[in-house]
C-alpha cells in the first residue's frame, strides 16, 4: 500500500493484497483498494473503492464503493456515518447488490465518554432481510494508567426462529 498527504487536508491511498504464490496473476485471487479523503478542523469525509477477485482468471469480481464522514461539534459531541454499495459478481443479478451503513455518536458524559452506534451486520444483499447491530458503551479512566470500557450490543438475526444475539463486554486498557 501507499499513501500521500497533499498537506492541505487532502490524502490519497492505494492498496493491494494477493495470494503469496500468485501475486497479480490470473490464477490468484487479488484485492485492490483506493481512498480519497479530506480532513478539516472538525470534520472529515472519504470516498473508498475496493475490488476483490473471488474466482480465478479474473471472474466473479466483487466491487465496493463507500462514503464515510464525521463531524465534531464544539460542545464535544461527535457524529460519524458511512454508506457502502457493493456488487457481488458471483451472485445472480437479482441478488448481487450489497448495502451496508452505520451511524455513531459519542461525547463526554460525566467523567467518561458515552457512545452508541447502529449499522448493518455483515454484508446485506438485496432481496434479503437486513440484519442490524446496535451497541452502547461508556469509557472512563479508572486511574492514570487504566481505562475501563463496558459495552452492550444487540445483533439481529434474519433467520426465522433464530434469536437475536445480545452481548456484554468489558475492555480494559493499560498505558505506562
Image (cartoon, grey):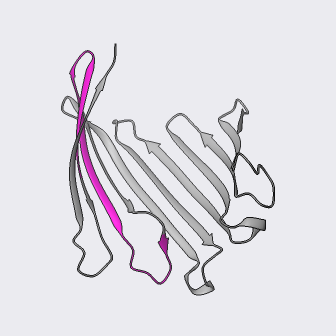
Q: Where residue 140 sits in the image (x, y, percent)?
A: 23, 30
Which residue: 60% across, 79% down? 91
Which residue: 57% across, 48% down? 45
- What span is colored magenta in the figure? 124-152
Q: Where residue 89 sits in the image (x, y, percent)?
A: 66, 74
Q: Where residue 85 sits in the image (x, y, percent)?
A: 57, 67
Q: Quadrant of residue 90?
A: bottom right
Question: Is residue 131 on the magenta stretch?
Answer: yes
Q: How many marks?
A: 0
Q: Nearer the viewer, residue 80 or 66?
A: 66
Q: Quadrant of residue 106?
A: top left
Q: Quadrant of residue 67?
A: bottom right
Q: Nearer the viewer, residue 91 or 80?
A: 91
Q: Nearer the viewer, residue 79 or 55?
A: 55
Q: Quadrant of the N terminus?
A: top right
Which residue: 33% across, 76% down? 158
Left-right relation of 8 to 125 = right
Q: Nearer the viewer, residue 60 or 135?
A: 60
The relative height of residue 69 versus residue 119 in the rendered view (above or below) is above
Q: Quadrant of the C terminus?
A: top left
Left-right relation of 152 to 73 = left
Left-right relation of 75 to 57 = left
Residue that sits furthest to the right in the current view: 25
Residue that sits furthest to the bottom in the current view: 94
Main SS of residues in magenta: strand
The relative height of residue 62 versus residue 94 in the rendered view (above or below) is above
Left-right relation of 103 to 17 = left
Q: Where residue 41 sits in the image (x, y, percent)?
A: 53, 33
Residue that sits furthest to the top in the current view: 176
Amino acid at each position: 500500500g501507499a499513501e500521500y498527504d497533499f498537506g492541505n487536508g487532502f490524502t490519497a491511498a492505494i492498496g493491494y493484497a494477493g495470494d503469496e504464490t500468485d501475486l497479480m496473476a490470473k490464477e490468484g485471487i487479488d484485492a485492490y483498494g483506493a481512498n480519497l479523503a479530506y480532513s478539516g478542523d472538525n470534520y472529515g469525509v472519504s470516498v473508498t473503492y475496493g475490488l476483490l477477485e473471488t474466482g480465478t482468471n479474473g471472474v466473479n469480481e466483487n466491487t465496493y464503493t463507500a462514503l464515510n464522514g464525521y463531524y465534531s461539534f464544539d460542545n464535544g459531541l461527535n457524529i460519524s456515518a458511512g454508506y457502502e454499495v457493493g456488487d457481488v459478481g458471483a451472485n445472480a443479478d437479482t441478488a448481487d447488490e450489497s448495502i451496508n451503513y452505520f451511524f455513531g455518536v459519542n461525547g463526554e458524559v460525566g467523567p467518561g465518554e458515552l457512545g452508541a452506534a447502529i449499522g448493518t451486520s455483515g454484508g446485506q444483499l438485496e432481496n434479503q432481510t437486513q440484519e442490524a447491530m446496535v451497541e452502547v458503551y461508556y469509557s472512563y479512566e479508572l486511574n492514570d494508567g487504566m481505562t475501563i470500557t463496558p459495552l452492550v450490543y444487540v445483533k439481529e438475526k434474519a433467520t426465522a426462529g433464530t434469536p437475536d444475539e445480545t452481548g456484554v463486554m468489558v475492555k480494559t486498557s493499560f498505558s505506562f
